[in-house]
Amino acid sequence: MKTTIMLCGILFSVAALASPVNDDFTNALIITGSMGSSEIIDNTLASAEPGEPEVAGYDPVHTLWWEYTAPTHGTLIVDTLQSDPGLDTVMGVYTGSYVGALQEVAYNDDSDFDAEGLSWIKMNVSSGVTYRVAVDGYGGAVGDIVLSWIAMPEVSPVPAHDDFTNALEITENTGMSPVIDTALATAEPGEPTHGGSGGYCSVWWKYTPMENGVLDINTTASDPDLDTVLAVYTGSSVSNLIEVASNDDNDPLDEYRSQLSFVATAGETYWIAADGYRGDTGFLVFRWEWIVGSPAPANDDFAHAIPITGPSGMADPVDTTYATAEPGEPAHVWNDAAHSVWWQYTAPSNAMLIASLEGSGDLFDTVMGVYTGNSVSNLTEVTSNDDDSDLSYRRHSRVYVPVDSGTTYWIAVDGYDFDTGVALLSWETVPLDADGDGANYYDELIAGTDPDDAESLFRITGFNGVDMEFESLSSREYGLFRCTNLTEGIWVPVGESQLGVDGEDAFTLSPTNPVGYYRIEVVR
């Protein structure tokens, strides 16, 4: 477009600045042929559209669009390596028919080549699928962009069970797949991200057990260099699946292969996806073993909680691997119930109950909750604990519970974030005020005093003021809170909150402040 203007009687023709032709998603430039490069396109006047997705994790600012429809299954490489060497690009590839409903397939910020800041993506493509390529400048950077591509047809067959609808059915109780080359396996639109890191080159199996039991699956016989993920689902379509279990790495000593077990219900169809971690491909071997019947521990359910009695003791160890959660079961320490086991304790007198998981399985990250109530869906939490740093393994749990005579308390033990292992519960009861100094046993422990020594009691008396000093940030707001009984854990704000100062700060307690425990929290 040109605009004609007159200055001092002289006519000038001025070209109006225009955004790039492929600024909008609907005007994406078409990529065709086995290889090629675009013209140089300056993205300075390009813009982001409403609903446009992030590009490689960054908000879109000056995006340019291309599209590629794969004529066959194969591999597509796209890059910005011929762009302005001083330009830092980001690139994303998507499927979807309009800009507000795109699903990310692949992305890259900086390539592994010497062209620092430029982007490179290699990905598998499926015949007939249209892929949308977005290129932007990192942090809104602008400059001359060139998109290059290489399209290669498949050189080995796509696995027959690449798609969810073609999942191979498991019919034997024990078995192992042949070696599967996942190089040309693909992800489908709407496919979930398996284990938080898959969803790129997946293959599928399905299993419908005739009886209740446990299915153990693993990829331990796969190529040692293939980093796998496994996920199990229920559901009716690839875009409407509910995760049952997932695993990335088998254990801390096996960084690449995956293994998991899950309790399966007779008649329910389970869909199993095996994928590569963040798009890794290679030679995959899938193995499975079916265990008939439920090996869940005896105290898996709330209704079958094992009673503990006496002033002290230790329960038999319980393996939580095949334990399950029940409908209506509460989250233990904000951790959704997954593999919980239960004990119950009826207090013969008022006392302090100390329950500990010290000595449980090595590396078993436990959580523990204590409740009152009459059913698993109608429980009131008394206290809970995730990690106790004073135990020999800090990720084991311990709780201190003031118990009332005649009241029944329910103790749930689970693993943090689906962890499982051997739970070893021990307990003891002590008087609420063992040394008769008027201080609660647990409160003295928290305060760092000896609950068995009446002379060991932390007090501040006759003071003119105490400064509670802390390091603060000006971007945060801090509040002072007081609690009169730590076992109840009710913290009440004291006075007004205050902004941080990017350095040493303090709240001052005066002689008029009531007796109690005080702490400082970030409130905003």
Image: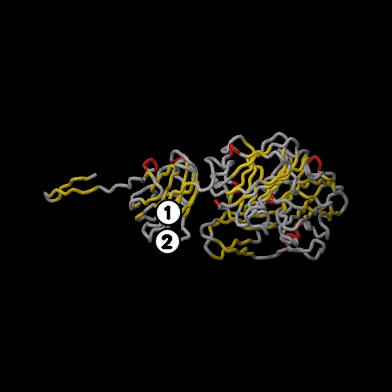
- Residue that appears at 41% across and 48% down: 34
Give 10 or 270, whichever is nearer the viewer: 270
Q: Quadrant of residue 68?
A: top left
Task: Give the residue number, with chain letter if any, for mark 2.
Answer: 115
- Local packing at callout 1 (Cα closer than 10 Å; few below 14, some 14-19, many 20+) is many
- Local packing at callout 2 (Cα closer than 10 Å; few below 14, some 14-19, many 20+) is some
- Dot 2 falls on a residue whose secondary structure is loop
Indicate the amino acid at tag 1: Asp
* Residue 332 in the figure: left or right of residue 9: right
- For residue 511, above or below residue 341: below
Of labels 2 and 1, earlier in sequence is: 1
- Dot 1 falls on a residue whose secondary structure is strand
Task: Give the residue number, with chain letter if any, for mark 1.
Answer: 79
> Mark 2 and mark 1: span between their CA atoms?
11 Å
Where is residue 55 shown, x and y percent of the image?
46, 50
- Residue that appears at 78% across and 47% down: 411
